[in-house]
């Protein structure tokens, strides 16, 4: 970066160079209005756009990523794009100019705005044709950490993403001395359409951590022959892989933090004793990350931009498209590693939190990939399981050793009630696509659980696959409590249940067994209604489900219901959210794993 | 040969069904010209499952192949499948044991029903007898991840036969696979010209050890054992050939 010829330096590049050198923008005389009292810049290394009117130029450019020249989509010359900084209470004016030779778009992820400003081609507008400028103009009535990205084709995969921060009009419920944005992305040097093709025509193409005969013998040694055989037989019968944790992995991805590869040692500065706010954004196409800073406790203060009651944690999983704000207070004058390990343990993004540039801290070793266990298989009970209370059961299962499983075929765990699990051995995956069509429990009122109640089948108290819960404190969804109650306290008047469905073999992903191309109409919300959306994940993979235009209030059993724009639904899980359908228009509703969305896991929600 | 016309009709009907498979409109009031928020993609793949040199125990050597190519969406696809060999040093051209053009429809998560026309005979030479089939096939992955390709054939002379291929990939390392393989051929009527007897014709089992240099390119070595039965074996015996044999192979599996 510092090698850019000085004569052609733009202001943006100057900022990048400055931040790479650890200079604050203030030192360059470009001190921005939002600078906090400590007067510290270096919030984000790719430059910052702010002011009453912001212009973004979208281009195809060749630039180095991890030292290798490659073609990426840039925004104002950087990829990922610059930090867009808006102010709550002030209208946003964002002029996006398309200098590509194809259509583009920008979706302002997590922002509540009029439908025509939402940036989804074919839904909110026609898209931005080459050479054209689209001006998104909307009132900003929220604050916090968000992001923006293309909603056209697979452009997100080639760097068309960036952070979006809205400064609060009123003081926030926590204070800090300094802030840094940590935008996590997954970069591939392959053409994204090639990646998609590989997923479509060659299952497991990117999985270099499949089970081998060696794993079988290792399990036999650990759990005995009979149990291991029973376990493996079950997976084989279903024609599934228990190592199916990420579709696209570190075998093609270089995981980036603010656009920097692990080897770049991108550094965020602090002064010992300061309280630092880290705005962590998962802007990747396909990768869940587990984030930790060895040696530092983190306090989660916001989720998806919305303030929550502080939760002290040592590690948190961030699903694709989620954001978390955490506070850290490094006391000593040494470096800490910002470590974001991919969920399948095939790689990591890494930076350093240090008092000075050029410092490094030990980088943790990657953990071993985990095998999916019983909880994922429960998924295959699908609807059968949905009505049944197995919240305790899954709790038990987490700590359960395979050796205790005793062969599913003849399984009889007297301590658990799992009537439908008997079906599992003969479970026919092919039935999965049959699904029930958007089951609609219209309100008899009394049959609906009260607002905020936990649905049976949820596992909000589990962090998910790949954690050793005894090792460190990991954030779970049941930890999330809104900082203050959200305004709409009405109970839901109806429930809408959707199944998350898929066919891994063909890489078809869908809701209720139908790809977007197969459905014949939108999902209807009545304008002004309060409804409960129930999502049942019948697949063996996590899905980050994103609703545009309206918040999803996660019914995790807490009185102070937290609200999110993206909900992670674990395999086999059944989650619910309350929605106030207060935003008229057509909105996108989809899995935020880019290739899942493109493979059909997309619906339109029409509020009228 | 008078049966060819209806066969062609079936094939073109299949092709039309494929072409007509558009996708439903989601009625969300988007003005015309906006396009759809998600586009449907079509893909294709050409897999050479086996391209191998065979050293048989009767001192015969041959080049053998088994390929399949497809193009289409998730439900509708067009397949071309071919299996054949060229025996070395017999002064005869190469021959297709089968060359099928099939329309394929996804009937269950792991299963495709296929139908179309097939050809058996020489490749650009008159060295081998020829015939045309109507083919009905079932291809997919059975429980335990056994890959299955079965087909039922009716020749232009009305002779009925069926064959089944099954293979399994045992992963030894992330890149090394041991692949047991099995083929069974049966026929309902005797067709002497092709050396086909009534009943169980032949079985062939093989084992290949494959190393994926890349996902797309994997050389292998292996061995097979085959045996003929009943009338089929008798016909072979009458020709003075052996009804049982084994061999070793070396080849490559690749796809594009």
Image (spheres, helix red, strand yellow):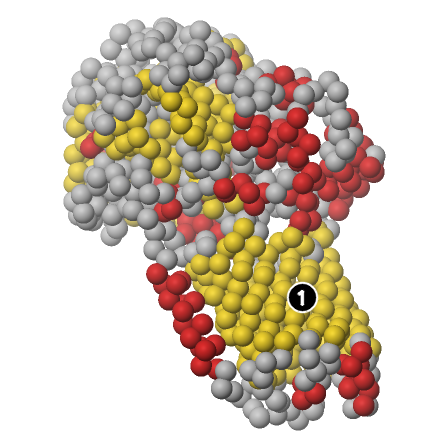
Q: As drawn, is B193 to the left or to the right of A438?
A: right
Quarter-of-image position of residue A234: top right
- In percent of width and height, residue B68 lies at 55, 67
Residue at 74% in and 23% down: A413
Task: Answer left or right for A588 relative to A335.
Answer: left
- Name the spot of residue A327 as percent of width and height, x first: 45, 13
Q: Position of residue B62 (x, y in %)?
A: 70, 81
Q: Is residue A532 above or below residue A55?
A: above
**Total numbered labels:** 1
Residue named by callout 1: B164
Rendered-image quadrant of the C terminus of chain A: top left
Q: Eyeballing the image, is A153 above or below B256?
A: above
Q: Residue A398 versus residue A294: which sits nearer the camera?
A: A398
Q: Answer with the quarter of the image where residue B247 lies.
A: bottom right
Residue at image x 80%, y 76%? B229
Nearest the eye: B203 or B214: B203
């Amino acid at each position: 970066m510092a090698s850019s010829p000085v004569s052609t330096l733009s202001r943006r590049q100057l900022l990048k160079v400055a931040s790479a050198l650890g200079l604050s923008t203030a030192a360059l005389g470009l001190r921005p209005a939002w600078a906090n009292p400590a007067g510290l810049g270096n919030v984000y290394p790719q430059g910052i756009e702010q002011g009453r009117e912001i212009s973004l130029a979208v281009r195809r450019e060749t630039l180095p990523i991890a030292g290798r020249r490659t073609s990426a989509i840039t925004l104002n010359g950087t990829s990922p794009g610059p930090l867009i900084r808006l102010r709550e209470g002030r209208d946003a004016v964002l002029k996006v100019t398309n200098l590509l030779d194809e259509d583009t778009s920008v979706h302002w992820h997590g922002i509540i705005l009029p439908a025509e400003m939402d940036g989804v081609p074919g839904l909110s507008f026609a898209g931005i044709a080459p050479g054209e400028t689209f001006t998104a103009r909307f009132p900003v009535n929220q604050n916090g950490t968000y992001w923006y990205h293309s909603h056209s084709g697979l452009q997100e995969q080639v760097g068309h993403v960036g952070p979006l921060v809205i400064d609060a009009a009123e003081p926030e419920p926590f204070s800090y001395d300094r802030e840094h944005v940590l935008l996590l992305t997954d970069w591939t040097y392959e053409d994204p359409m090639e990646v998609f093709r590989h997923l479509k025509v060659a299952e497991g193409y990117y999985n270099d951590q499949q089970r081998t005969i060696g794993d079988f013998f290792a399990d036999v040694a650990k759990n005995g022959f009979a149990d291991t055989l029973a376990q493996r037989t079950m997976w084989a019968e279903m024609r599934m892989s228990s190592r199916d944790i990420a579709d696209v992995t570190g075998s093609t991805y270089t995981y980036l933090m603010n656009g920097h590869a692990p080897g770049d040692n991108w550094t965020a500065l602090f002064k010992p004793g300061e309280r630092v706010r880290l705005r962590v954004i998962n802007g990747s196409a396909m990768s869940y990350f587990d984030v930790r800073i060895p040696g530092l406790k983190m306090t989660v203060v916001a989720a998806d931009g919305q303030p929550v009651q502080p939760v002290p944690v040592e590690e948190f999983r961030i699903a694709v498209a989620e954001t978390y704000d955490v506070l850290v207070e490094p006391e000593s004058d040494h470096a800490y590693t910002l470590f974001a390990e991919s969920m399948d343990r095939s790689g990591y993004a890494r930076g350093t939190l240090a008092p000075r540039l050029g410092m490094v801290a030990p980088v943790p070793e990657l953990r071993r990939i985990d095998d999916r266990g019983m909880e994922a298989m429960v998924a295959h009970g699908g609807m059968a399981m949905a009505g049944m209370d197995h919240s305790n059961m899954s709790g038990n299962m987490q700590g359960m050793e395979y050796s205790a499983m005793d062969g599913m075929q003849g399984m009889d765990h007297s301590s658990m009630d799992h009537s439908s699990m008997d079906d599992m051995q003969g479970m026919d995956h092919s039935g999965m696509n049959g699904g029930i069509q958007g089951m609609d429990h219209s309100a008899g009122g009394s049959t609906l659980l009260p607002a905020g109640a936990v649905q049976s089948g949820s596992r909000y108290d589990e962090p998910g696959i790949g954690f050793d819960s005894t090792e460190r404190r990991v954030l779970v969804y049941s930890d999330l409590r809104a900082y203050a109650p959200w305004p709409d306290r009405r109970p839901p008047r109806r429930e809408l249940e959707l199944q998350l469905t898929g066919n891994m073999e063909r890489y078809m992903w869908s809701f209720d067994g139908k790809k977007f191309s197969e459905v014949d109409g939108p999902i209807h919300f009545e304008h002004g209604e309060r409804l409960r959306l129930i999502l049942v994940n019948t697949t063996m993979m996590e899905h980050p489900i994103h609703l545009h235009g309206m918040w999803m209030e996660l019914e995790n059993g807490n009185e102070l219901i937290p609200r999110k724009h993206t909900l992670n639904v674990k395999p086999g899980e059944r989650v619910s959210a309350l929605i106030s359908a207060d935003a008229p228009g057509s909105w996108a509703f989809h899995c935020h794993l880019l290739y899942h969305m493109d493979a059909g896991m997309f619906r339109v929600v029409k509020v009228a | 040969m008078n049966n060819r016309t209806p066969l062609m009709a079936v094939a073109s009907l299949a092709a039309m069904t494929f072409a007509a498979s558009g996708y439903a409109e989601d009625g969300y009031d988007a003005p015309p010209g906006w396009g759809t928020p998600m586009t449907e993609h079509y893909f294709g793949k050409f897999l050479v499952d086996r391209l191998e040199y065979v050293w048989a125990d009767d001192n015969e050597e041959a080049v053998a192949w088994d390929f399949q190519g497809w193009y289409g969406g998730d439900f509708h696809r067009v397949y071309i499948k071919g299996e054949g060999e060229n025996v070395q040093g017999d002064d005869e051209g190469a021959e297709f044991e089968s060359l099928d053009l099939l329309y394929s429809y996804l009937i269950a998560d792991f299963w495709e029903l296929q139908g179309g026309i097939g050809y058996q005979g020489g490749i650009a030479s008159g060295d081998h007898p020829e015939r045309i089939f109507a083919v009905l096939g079932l291809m997919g992955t059975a429980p335990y991840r056994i890959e299955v390709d079965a087909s039922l054939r009716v020749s232009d002379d009305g002779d009925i036969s069926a064959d089944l291929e099954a293979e399994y990939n045992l992963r030894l390392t992330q890149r090394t696979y041991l692949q047991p393989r099995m083929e069974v051929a049966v026929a309902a009527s005797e067709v002497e010209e092709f050396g086909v007897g009534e009943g169980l014709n032949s079985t062939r089992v093989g084992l290949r050890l494959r190393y994926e240099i890349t996902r797309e390119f994997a050389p292998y070595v292996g061995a097979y054992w085959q045996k003929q039965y009943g009338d089929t074996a008798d016909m072979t015996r009458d020709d003075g050939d052996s009804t049982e044999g084994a061999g070793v192979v070396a080849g490559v599996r690749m796809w594009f």
